[in-house]
Amino acid sequence: HRLLRAHHMDANLPQDFQILDSEDQLRLLKRLIKAMNLDEKQWPPRQAMWYINSQKDEGLRPHHIQSYGNPVEQTWQKVYQAYQEACDRAGLVDFAELLLRAHELWLNKPHILQHYRERFTNIL
């Protein structure tokens, strides 16, 4: 998280971004699912959290996900989109987002990657 604090502007984050733990993430998802008028029994917040984290672990943003007309996938994609928009508005990042933002930072800003390659030659 120090990498993102040091390069928050390049990572499109506010300087004072807050890190969500899994309970905070779950609470936010419960609110969003309710606001989207989805049945929490059919669209469980824990399953939404798993879906979002697994997509982020694969490096996928909501607009990268192919639903192929599958209504279930489309709904999860909409939940992910709403969740990400809420987090971006509030300056919040979850643990999977920390990793994805760091990956995207190095991918999109090669000079930053080069700086850290020169600084750290061996990392365990």
Image (spheres, grey):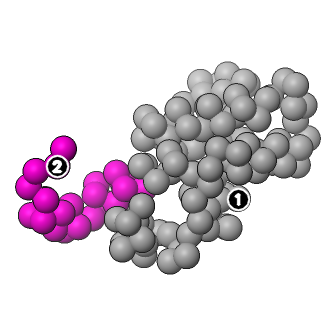
| Residue at the image position 82 percent from the left and 43 percent from the top | 30
**Counting other residues with Cα less than 10 Å from the Cα at mark 2, is it few (<14), some (14-19), or many (20 or more)?**
few
In the shown orientation, is residue 24 left or right of residue 110? right
| Residue at the image position 87 percent from the left and 31 percent from the top | 40
Query: Which secondary structure lies at badge 2?
Result: loop
Q: Which of the pair 121/107 is nearer the observer?
A: 121
Residue 52 in percent (x, y) is at: 60, 38
Residue 115 magenta-drawn? yes
Q: Quadrant of residue 115?
A: bottom left
Q: Can you say whether 31 is above or below 66 in the image?
A: below
Q: Can you say whether 78 is above or below 15 in the image?
A: above
| Residue at the image position 27 percent from the left and 64 percent from the top | 109
The amino acid type found where label 2 is placed reads Ile
Tell me if residue 74 can be seen. no
Q: Which residue is mark 2?
A: 123
Q: Can you say whether 12 is above or below 68 in the image?
A: below
Is there CB contact under 8 Å for labels 1 and 2? no
Query: Which secondary structure lies at badge 1?
Result: helix
Q: CA distance from mark 1 to mark 2?
A: 35 Å
The amino acid type found where label 1 is placed reads Ala
| Magenta-colored span | 101-124
The majority secondary structure of the magenta stretch comes to helix
Q: Which residue is mark 1?
A: 86
Residue 17 in percent (x, y) is at: 56, 69
In the shown orientation, is residue 115 left or right of residue 35? left
